Image (spheres, coloured by chain):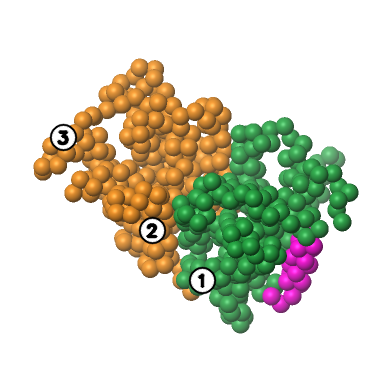
Chain colours: A green, B orange
């Protein structure tokens, strides 16, 4: 279906689509007021679950990916049960520690082949699959955004006590969101594994989280469209800037994060920022006269 | 016994790190993800001074000055702007993560990602006989430094005007301003002290491994967080006790399980303490619960 696209462009498209799934998995948590840093860990779980089931146990690829989603959701829920009573910085630290335990664990146990990773994973995931999956995810995100569920999430993010007072079961919503987020990150990891054929623990490091945070905060946390556009925009930018892939790439992501936090902490598409911009532009003619 | 001594030695470096992070958390309620980079920059500062032929104490002071300057610079630019706009908690986390990435990237490019040798000349060397055990003099020096730093911090916070001012600002910046204390000055002081402690830890890390590179501090960031979560966030004695305990646990984990297992000890400590007792050993108040 997408074979007419040149191979390199198709590769870029695949990478971008998988990044979009990861960013959405981070965003859905943030929209519920949860600042979790475990995304890379869940992606690693998903990638390894599917890769091991398919290569060692000869499962078909779709079944492996489904298993990855199931394992990701189960792990997220079982981790969420004790951890979701933590707030803010404590949750961020706890989830970061969890991600590190997962990745270091994978690098040090035998059946995952340690730091060398797994190679020769069947690559059945095509661009068509990814487009379909991302389309479904974005459709669901839009439905959630417009539904009671989405408004409840927003209420929890803005003020959880008021939300609880309005009859929203804060804990249940957070658990559900955490499970969905874990499942999506695991699915992205599994899809990535079946796209590249090779996975190793070091690809799920802290740098991945920083890149995803950049996409999410630049795009804005209020609606899914912002982060999706930001992910695509950064990919295009990355292809056209000469320092991409060099050591300066980290500098560039780091400085963008800092600048966005200073100018528009809720992202460039947030209402707070756009209204400020609008005010600035409206004022300009007055200054000219 | 020998293992406990080794654990206390590495633990006292963790304690120095934890003291710096806990001070910032206690005063500003900011978790500084830049702390590991400040440590590395401080270590490089002292390395440059040593390579220029300055004596060790001067080199340590140079490293501390570099780290303190960097910390204050971060605070008075980015963090001050965030404070002015009343940014939420996550904004500080994300901004300091971004800053840490920038700082690491600069060092990586300046050093071309090389591991630089760090001379041990002029630092205490060789073992000393103590209670029938061989204790390396360097580790004794590290332990003494962290205990002195803890005692100094505790006395300073409780018995000097500037220290009490810091506690007032930590309690409420608005009230402190009414009482004639300048919170911005207090923040700068807190960052200076925190940076100096980080540089000390950085020098000790560099000496004990006889090398320093742009990634020297990477692993230590989450170790520092583990220390202050274990000790109780914002608690000065907690940071020292937490650091020493973590150091001992890591050494025991290496000896009795495997050296690979010791890598995850810090993260497991974070998880377990958050689940069992989020306020840590000495924490004054609990993490918010539902």
Tell me where residue A36 sits by quadrant: bottom right
The answer to whether any part of residue B233 appears in the image is: no
Residue ID at (68%, 33%): A243
Same chain shared by disc 2 and disc 1: no
Residue wearing tag 3: B128
- Rendered location of residue B119, percent (x, y): 34, 24
Mark 1 crowdedness (10 Å alpha carbons): few <14, some 14-19, many ≥20: some
Residue ID at (42%, 23%): B48
Residue wearing tag 1: A78
- Above or below, A142 against B267 in this view is below
Depth order, front residue of B113/A5: A5
Depth order, front residue of A142/B84: A142
Mark 2 crowdedness (10 Å alpha carbons): few <14, some 14-19, many ≥20: many
- Rendered location of residue B76, percent (x, y): 51, 40
Q: CA distance from mark 3 to mark 2?
A: 32 Å
- Above or below, B45 against A25 in this view is above
Q: B251 left or right of A223? A: left
Residue wearing tag 2: B269
Q: A131 left or right of A247? A: right
Helix, strand or loop status at disc 3: strand
Q: Magenta residues, as a range?
A: A131-149
């Amino acid at each position: 279906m997408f074979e007419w696209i040149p191979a390199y462009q198709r590769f870029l498209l695949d990478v971008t689509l998988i990044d979009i799934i990861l960013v959405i998995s981070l965003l859905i948590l943030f929209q519920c007021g949860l600042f979790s840093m475990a995304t890379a860990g869940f992606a690693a779980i998903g990638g390894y679950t599917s890769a091991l089931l398919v290569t060692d146990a000869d499962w078909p690829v779709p079944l492996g990916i489904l298993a990855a989603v199931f394992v990701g959701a189960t792990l997220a829920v079982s981790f969420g049960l004790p951890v979701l009573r933590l707030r803010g910085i404590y949750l961020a630290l706890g989830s970061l520690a969890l991600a590190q335990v997962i990745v270091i664990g994978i690098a040090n146990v035998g059946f995952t082949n340690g730091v060398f990773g797994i190679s020769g994973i069947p690559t059945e995931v095509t661009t068509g699959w990814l487009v379909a999956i991302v389309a479904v995810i974005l459709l669901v995100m839009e439905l959630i955004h417009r539904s009671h569920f989405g408004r409840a999430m927003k209420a929890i993010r803005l003020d959880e006590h008021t939300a609880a007072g309005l009859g929203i079961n804060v804990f249940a919503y957070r658990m559900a969101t955490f499970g969905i987020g874990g499942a999506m990150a695991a699915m992205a990891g599994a899809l990535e594994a079946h796209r590249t054929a090779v996975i190793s623990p070091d690809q799920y490091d802290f740098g991945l989280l920083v890149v995803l945070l950049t996409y999410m905060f630049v795009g804005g946390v209020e609606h899914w469209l912002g982060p999706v556009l930001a992910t695509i925009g950064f990919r295009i930018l990355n292809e056209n800037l000469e320092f991409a892939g060099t050591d300066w790439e980290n500098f560039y992501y780091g400085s963008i994060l800092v600048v966005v936090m200073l100018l528009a902490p809720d992202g460039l598409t947030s209402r707070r920022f756009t209204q400020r911009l609008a005010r600035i532009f409206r004022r300009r003619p007055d200054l000219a006269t | 016994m020998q293992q406990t001594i080794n654990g206390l030695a590495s633990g006292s470096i963790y304690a120095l790190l934890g003291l710096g992070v806990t001070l910032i958390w206690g005063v500003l309620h900011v978790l500084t993800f830049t702390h590991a980079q400040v440590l590395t920059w401080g270590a490089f500062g002292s390395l440059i001074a040593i390579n220029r032929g300055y004596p060790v104490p001067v080199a340590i002071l140079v490293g501390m000055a570099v780290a303190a300057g960097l910390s204050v610079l971060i605070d008075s630019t980015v963090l001050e702007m965030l404070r002015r706009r009343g940014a939420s908690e996550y904004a500080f986390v994300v901004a300091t993560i971004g800053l840490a990435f920038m700082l690491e990237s600069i060092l990586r490019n300046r050093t071309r990602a090389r591991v630089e040798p760090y001379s041990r000349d002029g630092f205490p060397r060789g073992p000393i006989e103590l209670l029938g055990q061989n204790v390396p003099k360097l580790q004794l020096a590290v332990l003494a430094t962290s205990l002195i730093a803890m005692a100094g911090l505790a006395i300073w916070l409780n018995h000097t005007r500037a220290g009490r001012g810091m506690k007032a600002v930590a309690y409420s910046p608005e009230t402190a301003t009414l009482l004639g204390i300048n919170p911005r000055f207090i923040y700068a002081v807190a960052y200076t002290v925190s940076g100096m402690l980080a540089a000390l830890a950085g020098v000790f890390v560099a000496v004990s491994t006889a090398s320093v590179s742009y990634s020297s501090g990477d692993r230590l960031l989450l170790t520092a967080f583990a220390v202050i979560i274990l000790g109780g966030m914002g608690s000065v004695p907690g940071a020292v006790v937490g650091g020493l305990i973590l150091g001992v646990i890591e050494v025991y984990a290496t000896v009795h399980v495997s050296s690979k297992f010791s890598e995850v000890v810090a993260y497991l400590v974070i998880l377990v303490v958050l689940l069992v007792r989020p306020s840590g050993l000495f924490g004054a108040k609990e993490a918010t619960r539902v």
